[in-house]
Image (cartoon, rainbow, N blue to C red):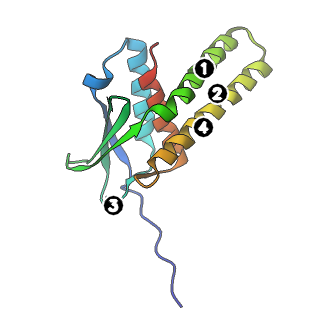
Amino acid sequence: MSSAPPPEDDSNNRIVAVTLDEESIGRSGPDIEHERAIAIYDLIEQNLFAPEGAHVGPFTLHIGITGSRLMFDIRREDGTPVVAHLLSLGPFRRIVKDYFMICDSYYQAIRTATPDKIEAIDMGRRGIHDEGSRTLQERLAGKVRVDFETSRRLFTLISVLHWKG
């Protein structure tokens, strides 16, 4: 009788630092920089991030934009390169655009709308955010294993990178 394989130890399969490539992403105003810092903090605080074939973490993630592609430069905590992945931004454009539109509606609604209206808009916002998170998980499949919550946090960061304020 064979025993089940031991569960994967994911304690080191995580991101411990995120940097943004200032040359390709650029700096923004204080509000946008603040939102980026919050998104990075939330991601680092709790995540599951396991690049395929890389058995030793934790990892650092350097994010940049190359042409119309998002670059994930993944390294070990000591700076040793693990892998770089380029993801087309195309599948995210509509989702990010829709997400910003509904976020604007939400922020307008919280000033004057009824609680029912605010809740309905917020449910739509969460639905679009979930769609972006699932799309990101699909794009990372076979490259990096992430759980849904990590995918949500990464999608938030990707969205903030597109925010013009």
For marks 3 and 4 on the same chain, the one whose residue lies earlier in the sequence: 3
Secondary element at tag 3: loop
Q: CA distance from mark 2 to mark 1?
A: 7 Å
The span from disc 4 to disc 2 (Cα, nearest Å) is 10 Å
* Of the pair 104 and 70, the residue shown nearer to us: 70
Q: Quadrant of the N terminus?
A: bottom right
Q: Please tell me which of labels 3 and 2 falls first in the chain.
A: 3
Q: Are marks 2 and 1 in contact (CB under 8 Å)?
A: yes
Q: Quadrant of residue 53?
A: bottom left
Percent x, y of residue 156: 49, 31
Distance CA(mark 3)–CA(mark 4) = 27 Å
Query: Closer to us: mark 1 or mark 4?
Result: 4
Question: In the image, what residue type sits under mark 1?
Answer: Cys
Residue occupying the point 72% across, 8% down: 112
- Residue kind at label 4, given as amino acid type: Glu
| Residue that sits furthest to the top in the current view | 112
The residue beneath circle 4 is 131
Tag 1 residue = 103
- Residue 25 badge: none
Residue 67 drawn at (x, y percent) = 33, 28
Which residue lies under the disc numbered 3? Answer: 53
Mark nearer the N terminus (4 vs 2): 2
Q: CA distance from mark 3 to mark 2?
A: 35 Å
Q: Earlier in the sequence, mark 2 or mark 1?
A: 1
Residue behind mark 2: 125
Tag 1 secondary structure: helix
Percent x, y of residue 120: 75, 25
Q: CA distance from mark 1 to mark 3?
A: 38 Å
Kind of residue indicated by mark 3 = Gly
Q: Is residue 131 left or right of residue 53?
A: right
> Which of the two labelled residues, at mark 1 and mark 3, occupies the earlier sequence position?
3
Residue at position x 47%, y 45% from top? 139
